[in-house]
Image (cartoon, rainbow, N blue to C red):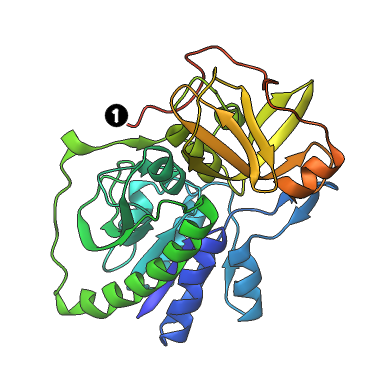
């Protein structure tokens, strides 16, 4: 099929590569303009742009999709379909109507749950036991179009956002190849989403990654997993920010929220609002990620000391928030 592809990060690049390998004709690639990134804030190309240049594909980086000249350019490509994956720009109705089969979106959730920008993180933070990929026919709404293909996967109890992202990259790429094989045959079933079940996956805020020790150990562990790799769950201890990259629920004597109960080779065990959490991989500001054993070799942390507290309500996201 003749495809216009629109996407920006690694998640999208995996899908683009799968479409190329499947023998589809990529008539144009749209991706976000280069953005400053890293400590030097140098302009960096997106993962999709890098891949498109490697394959010498026609590349467009518009700041907006509302330009009529761009619409004419896309129309002239005579594409069968546009595939969209984590593109980052809203497609106006005039663009949605250009390809013969419209625009298909690769969305990293089981719609209508977790419509929006951060479905992977929100699923972990809410304690969902499964997620997946939905191939959706795009319409003018935010992830509201009919569902054409759904594949489910379990979320493991120790899964971080990075690991889940990587699994969904593979599943998303496989799913769009499968969907495009069925599309011209009319073998994709259109399932209307139930708006009453919709949840909104709002963008991640750094403040959400601050640990609230009044919460249960289970919920705090979700925070650790959700914000790995970015921005990293963190807590304050003796005036310093400590990031927590890996933790585990454990049993034992419970103290006050934020109280350090045990320190040792296996980790730093902290009492929470309910239960205990053992911190296993941590990092002090400006330092390296270390196992708790190596961290304790260079830092004095004793049982009976406390992590600094934030207010009992804390920050965070309500998984019952409906759009």
Determine the residue positioned at 30% across, 57% down.
Answer: 97
Question: Is 296 placed above or below 192 here?
Answer: above
x and y percentages locating residue 297 in the rendered image? 83, 44
Q: Relative to residue 61, is residue 51 depicted above or below?
A: below
Nearer the observer, 95 or 141: 141
Q: Is residue 146 left or right of residue 302?
A: left
Assign the N terminus to one quadrant of the image.
bottom left
Answer whether residue 273 is visible to the viewer in this image.
yes
Question: Is 247 situated left or right of 318 in this image?
Answer: right
Q: Residues within 10 Å of mark 1 (few under 14, many from 20)?
A: few
**Is 52 situated left or right of 66 in this image?**
right
Label 1 sits on residue: 320
Task: Using the image as rendered, state which of residue 288 and residue 302 is in the foreground.
Answer: 302
Q: From the viewer's perspective, tell me whether residue 189 is left or right of residue 161.
A: left
Q: Secondary structure at mark 1?
A: loop
**In the image, residue 48 lies at what x, y percent?**
58, 66
Residue at 14% of width from left, 74% of height from top? 186
The answer to whether residue 38 shows anywhere in this view is no
Name, please, the residue furthest toward the top. Answer: 311
């Amino acid at each position: 099929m003749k495809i216009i592809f629109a996407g920006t990060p690694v998640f999208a690049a995996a899908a683009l590569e799968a479409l190329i390998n499947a023998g589809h004709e990529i008539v144009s690639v749209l991706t976000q303009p280069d953005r400053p990134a890293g400590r030097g804030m140098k302009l960096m190309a997106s993962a999709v742009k890098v891949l498109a240049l490697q394959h010498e594909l026609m590349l467009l980086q518009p700041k907006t999709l509302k330009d009529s000249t761009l619409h004419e350019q896309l129309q002239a490509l005579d594409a069968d379909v546009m595939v969209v994956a984590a593109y980052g720009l809203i497609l106006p109705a005039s663009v949605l109507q250009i390809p013969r089969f419209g625009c298909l979106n690769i969305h990293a959730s089981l719609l209508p749950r977790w419509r929006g920008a951060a479905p992977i993180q929100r699923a972990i933070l809410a304690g969902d036991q499964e997620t997946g990929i939905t191939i959706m026919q795009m319409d003018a709404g935010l992830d509201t179009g009919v569902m054409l293909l759904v594949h489910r996967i379990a979320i493991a109890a120790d899964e971080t956002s990075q690991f889940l992202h990587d699994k969904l990259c593979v599943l998303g790429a496989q799913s769009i190849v499968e969907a495009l094989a069925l599309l011209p045959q009319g073998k994709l079933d259109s399932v209307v989403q139930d708006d009453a079940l919709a949840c909104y996956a709002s963008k991640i805020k750094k403040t959400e990654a601050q640990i609230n020790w009044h919460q249960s150990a289970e919920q705090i562990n979700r925070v650790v997993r959700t914000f790995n790799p970015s921005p990293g769950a963190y807590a304050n201890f003796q005036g310093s920010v400590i990031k927590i990259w890996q933790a585990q629920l454990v049993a034992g004597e419970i103290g006050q929220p934020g109280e350090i109960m045990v320190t040792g080779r296996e980790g730093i065990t902290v009492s929470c609002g309910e239960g205990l959490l053992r911190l296993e991989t941590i990092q002090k500001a400006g330092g390296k990620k270390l196992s708790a054993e190596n961290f304790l070799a260079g830092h004095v942390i004793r049982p009976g000391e406390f992590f600094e507290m934030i207010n009992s309500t804390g920050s965070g996201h309500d998984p019952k928030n409906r759009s």
